Image: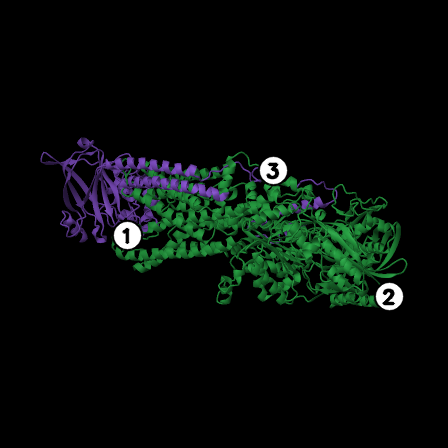
Chain colours: A purple, B green
């Protein structure tokens, strides 16, 4: 007889998938009811560990025997890690120079800042500073922006990865996400399109070391400042037309904020111009937080390959990039690196604090355990 | 499945009366009756997609996701790629859709199978093979042995003498015993003469299709003469023809109009309390979501005003956005999209998968499989599992549930003398054991060898030709509706409608009054070796109201006699005044029998006057052919003749307890489950079963008996009882009194009230009727719920449901009803969970139940093991599920404060898409399918472990808030640790890694490892599968990110996978791993510490028991857990053999002191209990 009677209405929970079972089952009971049927156990469920819920299992239990050692061990481990991190963070030398030049700060760059507010670029200013101690190499030179929302959703999506990977269709028809920096008012596509590219950081720095009363330029290496995957896979120039990058960019226009087209980013070095310009790539890797630093150059050549000696330096800045309008700040940072990267006391401190807290909690738990163990045991009896 | 409704919907008028003519299709077609094809399927190939999608989108979660999808199409609002919503939605829709499709496909298959069954139909004088679906009302069809009945048929003729037809109704009501139907004599003449059958043009007028299986009224008009039709002449669809070579029938109702189909599809959906809680929580989450989005939208407005406006140098506002508030408004919707993952779309699907899995465990459990009739336990509803772990009240039927419903003629009282007890030489009543000498029936060739009786004096009385004794057994052999079957001479088999009846006829048979054959007009009895044929003049059949049946027979000598048997209270009212003294003596015996838990019937007879009977018989014939009010007229006639009866005696039938019932009840009681027995039996029987089941016992302070006959008396009795149990509950200061004085209080839920001891309550059906009325309801529920055990006797099926409803109404408790018979169906459907015993009384209870098994004792396993595990698993699942989604989603919220409230996501969009579906689904499913805190044996040994479920401790609103807080804490850690670690961070080669993609990768890796560790912490039972799922999910995560962020994927799908290289560049940094490790321990260790301290400082009952079990596990194997169970089981199921004389009288007298039974150690009747407990 049909299975529909056995299951009046398939419930929401997969009753229907069992309708077949009900069908078989009803057939089984009918057979069992007939007089000739053996009392065979045709409906007897299988005896497997799975069906009988007897799968072998490990049953860890949270007891004093496990919890207390866990707390003490983790606590000690955290303390050790925290100390390690703290000390290695301490060995890192770092120097921050704010050159925003907010009006009224009397800063060297205030002039440029005012000029940038007025919309003019190309202003230069220089900062003189002392390194109190030797910075062992390689020394990295970063620029840091604050109050700058590279992580804004609309900012972050305003790019065309297809275009940046050198795709021809990307050049002629940039992605809609780039809007309003997709095409210029005449409808000519912008390359590279989008708000990120358009807002490329374009201050430049030159460093000089005072030795024997003369400022000698410190060579700044701009190679390998971006991720290998970015400069080699993610970004590539469009296919050259007749060996010319300029021709490849034909039919596109530069981003409105840029002084030159993309193929002119590094005129002297064909391996560093266009989309594969490393400064551009670094900028295009948008920051996670509104205060961020990006690698500008590394000091690893010539006399300074082993580090920056103690002494006086001068930093010449081409002040192009306006940040004052939105209360942003600009900084230059000199930093050494260790195995754990740059200076970041956060991890070390948290590890130390948490490690101590762990051990403290461990003792509290031990005390509680000793105090209540007997009582709990008695309750059970 | 409103299939009949659909058909009706097409017709304008509801059918009032059915009118049809045999062999006249043209005439019948006018009425547009449904033909015999049935359709239970919902969709066809083309309608499936639209209809199914329409149904699915009616669910709030699915509709919500559709709404999100639409939101995502708005460019100003869209904050996530379309696939993050589409992929989960499509997956969920597909899973449900496939399930529905399979369901419907099976229904199609079964429809087709049924519709295409062959049948022989009489057309133009010839039998033609046709399919079921082509049969129409008014057709005459031929059925052969073992055929299924095609439609609801009027039986015309059959191969058997007197045109009897035997049917099995197992598919209809589950009863496997044969039933007999008989055609009208006038149609029986048609035989198998096809010509006559073709010429047959009878017109039938009958009631419109309905769902009453046991009622049919109509008339057949043939050649101007009217004949009454009733249910006895109907073959209903769903039955099977047995023992009948062939029969012809006239189709009355076809297809959807048949009673079988009319009975389908009226199942009410039951939902668990967790379901309801979940719905509330989803709404709460919606509110929470709206709140978060609102905060972020405000934040965005302020930000755009303060900063964004100025930042336009680098990031102009989007098209159309002209002001900060408008941006905030758009951002509200963007955040609705981003934060949608707090409303877990996969929640419902996962919950259903878990329940389905846990239902399969019930089906698969060998310890709930009953080998004797090859019945495994069955979870018929797969949506109620966790509620099995929360039961507080069990409403149990007695007959067939607590007892086996195997009836044995045990004692009788004949003419004031009681038989059945065995006395020793000294005249002391002795106990019957295996060694007691049985009565030898070998003198009687026709005796049933299985029948056992011990009292020799009854045989002697029969042999001595004692008139009363002969009359007694003669009555038993005549007054019944049993069908004999004698395939070999002397090998008599009785097909009885009720086992009581079978037992009585079998007793008469063994004592020399062998009921041998019956025809509609005669009964053949071999009385002490001499064959006598009685003329059967009328059967005044049994029903629930009459509670008695009578036959009127004419003996071979020509005497007219009415024999009656029935319930004592009923029959006593009808007795002649002359048997007053006999009445008293018999009543004494009756009390005694009932006190021993026996089922009693009183038998009486009456000699009738010929002329009076003739006249009565005529009126009877008229009444039985009346169209309207037939029932009433008949019962009036019955009343009239069944009076001034002469008492013959009483019978007592033993009703054996099922195996393991007392132990089960004791275990359940230890789990603080209150057991109410609702039985139709009389008070003494019920109370006695109560004692023998360990429900009532000597340690009870009192057993109250409510048997008042007026509303006031009942109220008084209830109040007296309550006063004794808890005098404080009458104070004005009592919170319930206060509550109900104050009508503004809406909630009717009563808090628990504690009695000052253990009490029992017995309430009678008629008192219950008063107590269930409006104003007494509250008194009843307060009093009854204070008692540990409540026994309601003499209750009707409706009252059973009312009692369940009462508790549901006033108590915040999960109820379970268990029963096996048709009279339990209402209660089973009413209770939160209905359990059917697939036993003797048929399948009706099982068919309407949610769970079924063969033995009452499996209930403890169902609740204490499966129910508890299901509950724990479901709660753990929900807690974890909400936690993981909150921890996941709220990180976006914190990030909003650092990303200009721009609806920036923290994670990669692919991660958002796959998080719930791939990365975290299997570990939590693994936990929810395999977890067990302690194994089944410990669960049964410590019923206390069941209590947290009853109090709903593991998942409730507070637990939900805790999950949310835990999620918030984790999300804070998961955001701020990467934040701190990333802030100004650079790689060891000086390159920056504080970029968005690295941050996203770090946060998502932290999150995934933290939730994986958390599931590990929540898992108490680590099977290989759990390990595999957890490690597998983590490996899959790393495999996927390395694949998705690989060069190849970028080169192929440039736009879709912009995260190229992030995994390689970020995960190679030691400080990233240090930060990940820090987030893990910061998220997990406080949980560990909190749990440890909670278990130490405020251990719950289950903590203590777990500690005890843990200690016990360390020791060598526990000494003998069995002794614990056996200790209190002094009153064994062998009550029928073990009760002392006068026990019933003691109960009756109200003295509840029961003597300790002296022979409890002799291992009375309980064949399986030992075996089963050792498993």
Do the residues at pointers 2 and 1 share their chain? yes
- Checking the image for residue B307, the label placed there is none
Q: Position of residue B1136 (x, y in %)?
A: 71, 48
Question: Which chain is indicated by disc 3?
Answer: A
Helix, strand or loop at mark 1:
loop
Q: Are marks 2 and 1 in contact (CB under 8 Å)?
A: no
Mark 2 neighbour class, 10 Å CA radius: few under 14, some 14 to 19, many 20 or more: few
**Chain ID at mark 2:** B
3 and 2 marks on the same chain: no
Where does label 3 land, which residue? Answer: A47
Pointer 2 residue: B609
Residue that label 1 marks: B315
Residue B204 position in % (x across, y down): 75, 64
Q: Quadrant of the N terminus of chain B?
A: bottom right
The Cα–Cα distance between marks 3 and 1, rounded to whole angstroms, is 67 Å
User: In which chain is the residue bearing label 1?
Assistant: B
Left or right for A5, reference B129: left
- Determine the CA span between mark 3 and mark 2: 68 Å
The secondary structure type at the circle numbered 2 is loop
For the residue pair B966 and B722, the one nearer the viewer reads as: B722
């Amino acid at each position: 007889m049909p299975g529909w009677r056995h299951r009046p209405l398939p419930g929401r929970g997969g009753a229907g998938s069992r309708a077949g079972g009900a069908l078989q089952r009803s057939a089984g009971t009918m057979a069992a009811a007939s007089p000739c049927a053996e009392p065979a156990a045709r409906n007897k469920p299988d005896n497997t560990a799975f069906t009988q819920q007897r799968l072998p299992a490990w049953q860890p239990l949270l007891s004093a025997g496990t919890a207390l050692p866990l707390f003490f061990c983790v606590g000690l481990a955290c303390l050790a890690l925290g100390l390690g991190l703290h000390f290695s963070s301490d060995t890192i030398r770092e120097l921050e120079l704010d050159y925003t030049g907010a009006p009224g700060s009397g800063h060297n760059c205030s002039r440029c800042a005012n000029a940038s507010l007025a919309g003019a670029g190309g202003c230069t200013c220089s900062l003189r500073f002392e390194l109190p101690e030797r910075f062992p190499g390689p020394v990295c030179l970063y620029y840091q922006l604050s109050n700058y929302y590279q992580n804004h959703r609309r900012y972050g999506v305003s790019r065309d990865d297809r275009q940046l990977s050198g795709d021809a269709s990307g050049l002629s028809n940039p992605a809609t996400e780039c809007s309003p920096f997709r095409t210029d008012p005449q409808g000519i596509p912008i390359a590279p399109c989008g708000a990120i590219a358009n807002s490329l950081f374009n201050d430049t720095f030159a460093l000089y070391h005072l030795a024997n009363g003369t400022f000698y330029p410190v060579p700044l290496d701009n190679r390998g400042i971006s991720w290998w995957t970015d400069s080699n896979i993610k970004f590539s120039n469009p296919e050259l037309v007749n060996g010319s990058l300029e021709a490849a960019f034909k039919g596109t226009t530069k981003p409105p904020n840029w002084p030159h087209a993309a193929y002119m980013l590094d005129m002297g070095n064909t391996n560093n111009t266009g989309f594969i310009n490393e400064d551009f790539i670094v900028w295009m890797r948008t920051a996670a937080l509104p205060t961020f630093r990006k690698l500008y150059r590394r000091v690893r050549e010539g006399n300074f390959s082993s580090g920056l000696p103690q002494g006086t330096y001068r930093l010449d800045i081409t002040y192009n990039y306006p940040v004052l309008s939105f209360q942003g700040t600009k900084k230059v940072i000199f930093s050494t690196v260790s195995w754990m990267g740059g200076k970041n006391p956060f991890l070390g401190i948290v590890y130390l604090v948490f490690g101590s807290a762990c051990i403290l909690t461990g003792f509290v738990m031990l005390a509680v355990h000793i105090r209540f163990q007997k009582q709990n045991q008695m309750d059970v009896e | 499945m409103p299939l009949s409704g659909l058909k009706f919907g097409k017709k304008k008028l509801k059918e009032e009366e059915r009118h049809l003519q045999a062999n006249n299709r043209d005439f019948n077609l006018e009425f547009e009756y449904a033909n015999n094809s049935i359709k239970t399927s919902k969709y066809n190939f083309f309608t499936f997609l639209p209809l199914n999608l329409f149904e699915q989108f009616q669910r709030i979660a699915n509709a919500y996701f559709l709404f999100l999808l639409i939101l995502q199409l708005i460019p100003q609002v869209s904050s996530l790629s379309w696939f993050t919503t589409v992929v989960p939605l499509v997956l969920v829709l597909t899973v449900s859709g496939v399930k529905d499709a399979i369901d419907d496909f099976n229904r199609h298959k079964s429809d087709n199978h049924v519709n295409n069954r062959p049948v022989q139909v009489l057309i133009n004088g010839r039998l033609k093979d046709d399919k079921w679906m082509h049969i129409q009302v008014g057709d005459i069809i031929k059925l052969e042995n073992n055929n299924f009945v095609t439609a609801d048929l009027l039986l015309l003729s059959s191969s058997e003498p007197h045109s009897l037809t035997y049917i099995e109704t197992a598919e209809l009501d589950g009863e496997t015993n044969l039933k007999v139907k008989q055609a009208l004599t006038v149609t029986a003449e048609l035989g198998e003469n096809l010509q006559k059958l073709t010429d047959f043009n009878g017109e039938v007028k009958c009631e419109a299709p309905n769902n009453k299986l046991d009622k049919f009224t109509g008339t057949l008009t043939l050649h101007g003469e009217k004949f009454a039709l009733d249910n006895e002449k109907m073959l209903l669809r769903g039955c099977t023809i047995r023992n009948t070579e062939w029969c012809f029938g006239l189709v009355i109702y076809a297809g959807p109009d048949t009673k079988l189909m009319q009975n389908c599809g009226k199942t009410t959906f039951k939902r668990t309390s967790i379901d309801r809680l979940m719905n509330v929580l989803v709404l709460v989450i919606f509110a929470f979501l709206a709140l978060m989005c609102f905060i972020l939208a405000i934040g965005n407005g302020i930000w755009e005003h303060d900063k964004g406006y100025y930042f336009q140098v680098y990031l102009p506002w989007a098209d159309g956005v002209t002001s900060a508030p408008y941006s905030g408004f758009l951002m509200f919707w963007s955040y609705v999209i981003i934060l949608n993952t707090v409303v877990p779309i996969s929640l419902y699907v996962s919950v259903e998968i878990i329940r389905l899995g846990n239902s399969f465990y019930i089906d698969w459990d060998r310890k709930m499989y009953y080998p004797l009739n090859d019945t495994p336990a069955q979870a018929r509803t797969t949506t109620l599992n966790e509620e099995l772990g929360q039961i507080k009240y069990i409403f149990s039927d007695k007959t067939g549930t607590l007892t086996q419903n195997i009836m044995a003629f045990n004692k009788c009282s004949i003419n004031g003398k009681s038989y059945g007890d065995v006395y020793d030489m000294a005249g002391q009543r002795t106990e019957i054991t295996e060694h007691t000498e049985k009565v030898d029936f070998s003198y009687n060739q026709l005796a049933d060898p299985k029948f056992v009786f011990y009292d020799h004096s009854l045989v002697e009385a029969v042999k001595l030709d004692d008139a009363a004794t002969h009359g007694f057994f003669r009555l038993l052999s005549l007054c019944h509706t049993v069908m004999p079957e004698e395939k070999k001479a002397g090998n008599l088999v009785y097909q009885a409608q009720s086992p009581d009846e079978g037992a009585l006829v079998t007793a008469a048979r063994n004592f020399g009054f062998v009921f041998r054959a019956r025809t509609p007009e005669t009964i053949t009895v071999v009385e002490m070796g001499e064959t006598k044929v009685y003329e059967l003049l009328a059967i005044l059949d049994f029903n629930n109201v009459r509670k008695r049946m009578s036959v009127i027979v004419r003996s071979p000598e020509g005497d007219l006699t009415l024999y009656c048997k029935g319930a004592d209270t009923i029959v006593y009212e009808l007795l002649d005044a002359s048997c007053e003294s006999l009445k008293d003596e018999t009543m004494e015996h009756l009390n005694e029998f009932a006190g021993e838990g026996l089922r009693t019937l009183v038998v009486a007879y009456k000699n009738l006057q010929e002329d009076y009977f003739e006249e009565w018989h005529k009126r009877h014939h008229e009444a039985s052919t009346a169209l309207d009010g037939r029932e009433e007229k008949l019962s009036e006639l019955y009343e009239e003749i069944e009076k001034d009866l002469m008492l013959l005696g009483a019978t007592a039938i033993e009703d054996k307890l099922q195996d393991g019932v007392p132990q089960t009840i004791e275990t359940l009681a230890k789990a603080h489950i209150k057991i109410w027995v609702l039985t139709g039996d009389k008070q003494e029987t019920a109370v006695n079963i109560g004692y023998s089941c360990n429900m009532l016992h000597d340690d009870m302070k009192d057993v109250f008996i409510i048997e008042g006959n007026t509303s006031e008396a009942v109220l008084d009795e209830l109040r007296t009882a309550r006063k004794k149990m808890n005098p404080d509950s009458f104070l004005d200061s009592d919170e319930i009194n206060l509550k109900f004085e104050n009508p503004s209080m809406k909630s009717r839920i009563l808090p628990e009230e504690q009695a000052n001891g253990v009490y029992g309550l017995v309430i009678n059906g008629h008192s219950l009727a008063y107590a269930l009325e409006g104003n007494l309801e509250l008194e009843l529920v307060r009093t009854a719920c204070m008692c540990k055990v409540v026994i309601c006797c003499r209750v009707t099926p409706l009252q059973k449901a009312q009692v369940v409803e009462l508790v549901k109404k006033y108590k915040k408790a999960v109820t379970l009803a268990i029963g096996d018979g048709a009279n339990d169906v209402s209660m089973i459907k009413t209770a939160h969970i209905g359990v059917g015993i697939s036993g003797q009384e048929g399948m009706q209870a099982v068919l309407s139940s949610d769970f079924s098994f063969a033995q009452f004792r499996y209930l403890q396993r169902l609740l204490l093991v499966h129910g508890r595990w299901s509950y724990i698993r479901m709660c753990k699942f929900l807690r974890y599920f909400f936690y993981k989604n909150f921890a996941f989603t709220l990180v976006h919220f914190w990030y909003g404060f650092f990303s200009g409230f721009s609806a920036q996501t923290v994670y990669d969009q692919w991660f958002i898409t796959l998080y719930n579906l791939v990365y975290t689904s299997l570990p939590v499913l693994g936990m929810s399918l395999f977890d067990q805190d302690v194994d089944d044996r410990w669960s049964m040994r410590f019923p206390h472990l069941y209590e947290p479920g009853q109090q709903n401790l593991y998942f409730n609103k507070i637990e939900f808030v805790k999950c949310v807080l835990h999620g918030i804490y984790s999300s804070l850690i998961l955001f701020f640790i990467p934040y701190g670690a990333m802030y100004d961070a650079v790689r060891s080669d000086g390159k920056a890694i504080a970029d968005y993609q690295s941050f996203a990768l770090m946060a998502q890796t932290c999150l995934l490892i933290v939730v994986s560790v958390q599931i590990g912490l929540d898992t108490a039972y680590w099977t290989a599968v759990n390990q595999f799922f957890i490690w597998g999910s983590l490996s899959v995560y790393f495999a996927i990110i390395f694949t998705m962020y690989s060069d190849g994927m970028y080169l192929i799908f440039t736009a879709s996978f912009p995260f190229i290289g992030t995994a390689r560049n970020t995960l190679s940094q030691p400080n990233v791993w240090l930060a990940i490790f820090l987030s893990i321990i910061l998220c997990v260790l406080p949980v560990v510490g909190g749990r440890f301290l909670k278990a130490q400082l405020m251990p719950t009952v289950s903590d203590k028991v777990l500690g005890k079990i843990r200690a016990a596990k360390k020791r060598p194997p526990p000494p003998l857990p069995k002794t614990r169970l056996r200790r209190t089981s002094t009153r064994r199921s062998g009550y029928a053999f073990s009760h002392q004389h006068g026990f019933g009288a003691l109960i009756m007298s109200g003295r509840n002191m029961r003597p300790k039974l002296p022979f409890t150690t002799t291992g009375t009747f309980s064949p399986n209990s030992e075996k089963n407990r050792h498993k």
